[in-house]
Image: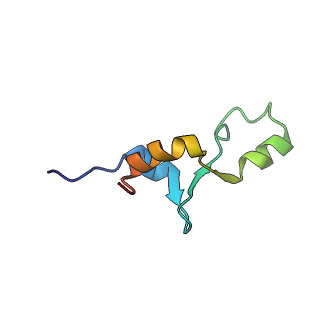
Amino acid sequence: MPKMKTNSSAKKRFSLTGTGKIKKKGAYKSHILTKKSTKQKRNLTQTSYVSDGDTGNVKRMLCIGK
């Protein structure tokens, strides 16, 4: 059997925590920032966790687990 390949885009966007959760950065922070309020831009800076429904897909892309 060949080795599993990690999805290159996923390994740049997601990181694993010590407890097994997957961290992600908020979207909509790269351009067209003039129309967004300061509060919205500040809140988009914070990282969050991948939802439970998407965790399986992300783990499969990162070759984590089974």
Q: Is residue 17 above or below residue 23?
A: below
Residue visible at 36% across and 53% down in the picture:
63
* Left or right: residue 22 compared with residue 36: left
Would residue 64 be found to the left or right of residue 5 on screen?
Answer: right
Q: Nearer the viewer, residue 37 or 24?
A: 24
| Left or right: where 46 falls relative to 3 | right
In this rendering, position of residue 14 left or right of residue 51: left
Residue 64: name its quadrant: bottom left
In terms of depth relative to the viewer, which is nearer, 53 or 63? 53
Of all residues, the one furthest to the left in this rendering is 1
User: Where does the C terminus fall, quadrant-wise?
Assistant: bottom left
Residue under the point 59% across and 50% down: 24
The coloring applied to the image is rainbow
Return the x and y of residue 16 as percentages of the image width and height.
51, 60
Q: Position of residue 30 (x, y in %)?
A: 64, 40
Which residue of the protein is positioned furthest toward the bottom in this rendering?
18
- In the image, residue 44 lies at what x, y percent? 73, 45
Residue displayed at 34% across by 50% down = 6
Residue at 43% across, 44% down: 9
